[in-house]
Amino acid sequence: MRRYGKHTDEDDIKVRPNRRGSRPRTSIRPKHEDAAEGFVVTVDRGRITCLVGDRTVVAMKARELGRKGVVIGDRVALVGDLSGAKDTLARIVRVEERSSVLRRTADDNDPYERVVVANADQLAIVTALADPEPRPRLIDRCLVAAYDAGLEPLLVLTKADLAPAEPLLETYAPLGVRHVVTSREELADGGAERVRALLLGRITAFVGHSGVGKTTLVNALVPDRQRATGQVNAVTGRGRHTTTSALALPLPGEVAFPPPRRGGWVIDTPGVRSFGLHHVDPSRVILAFPDLEPGTADCPRACSHDEPDCALDAWVADGHADPARLHSLRRLLAARERREGD
């Protein structure tokens, strides 16, 4: 029996819908040429807060980014609702090429890299001179990570009212690392100008273990954005985590976009208990020692620069470099092979 009459119309014929979608799939993705430029200031449980012009916009990753991560300091392209109004959500459709990436691993046996911050150009290594006691091994590891990422290190010593800074500074003098010494009284009186002078026009990431006064220093630098601070445990000598997520803050005088322009930015990161260097190739550490690097030309292949036939010993003996510099290099290379508490 015929289901339709003689003069059936195409509109009368029912077509079973395609379960895979009615539109053909394509590998061509939109270019989003009209996307707005943004700067990631914090990331919290999948919600990414960005600075877009003079507005703060909350966004999430677009599906086309796949597994590509978005971290604090990233420059991104956004589409959607960019008004910054409450309960609005934009989409990040592109992550621009990064100029630098500071990484760390949980420990030296962990192959999984964690990106701490992107596009910074300075790493402020904050350590207290007392309460808690300084940990030179952690400082060494942060220096290795800074050199590997192409960041200029800055050693910030806090709580100078509790202990002298000279013994620790003598250890790092051969490295030529810039440094600044502060005290709690100085910061309480609003005297953070000496530190601020070293941050102008830069994006600076602050790292250090808990309790060293890192957030207290950031609060003194950016007084209108006070973050919670904690105290050192009297039994363990360790600080308690009060900063739970990284946050980028503009220094007074930062008025232009994209950053930095004039005032500079600081990125306050949570306190760390360890700084693994599984991702660092030891051969790249020598690049931070331009006075020693030419001496490696006669080193044997895969030289660790800490073995009997290393050519650097003869290079230094001939007067091409200070022996203290070679000692510092080998101390940093050894830092990758031992834990911070050793």
Image: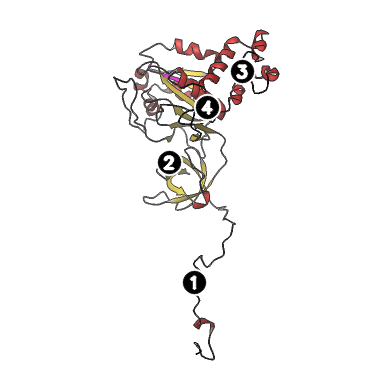
How far is the residue under mark 4 from the one under mark 2? 22 Å
Q: Is residue 179 visible?
A: yes
Helix, strand or loop for disc 4: helix
Q: Residue furthest bottom?
A: 6
The residue where tag 1 is placed is 17
Q: Is residue 230 left or right of residue 246?
A: left
Q: Amino acid at mark 2?
A: Val
Magenta region, residue range: 156-161
Helix, strand or loop for disc 3: loop
How far is the residue under mark 3 from the one under mark 2? 40 Å
Helix, strand or loop for disc 2: strand
Colouring used for the render: secondary structure
Q: Amino acid at mark 1?
A: Pro
Q: Position of residue 150 (x, y in %)?
A: 57, 28
Of callouts 1 and 2, which one flags the residue occurring earlier in the amino acid sequence? 1
Of callouts 4 and 2, which one flags the residue occurring earlier in the amino acid sequence? 2
Above or below 105: residue 62: below
The residue where tag 2 is placed is 43
Q: Position of residue 316 (x, y in %)?
A: 64, 10
The residue where tag 3 is placed is 305
The residue where tag 4 is placed is 145
Q: Position of residue 56 (x, y in %)?
A: 42, 44
How far is the residue under mark 3 from the one under mark 4? 18 Å
Of callouts 3 and 4, which one flags the residue occurring earlier in the amino acid sequence? 4
Above or below 192: residue 61: below
Of callouts 3 and 2, which one flags the residue occurring earlier in the amino acid sequence? 2
Q: Quadrant of the C terminus?
A: top left
Q: Amino acid at mark 4?
A: Ala
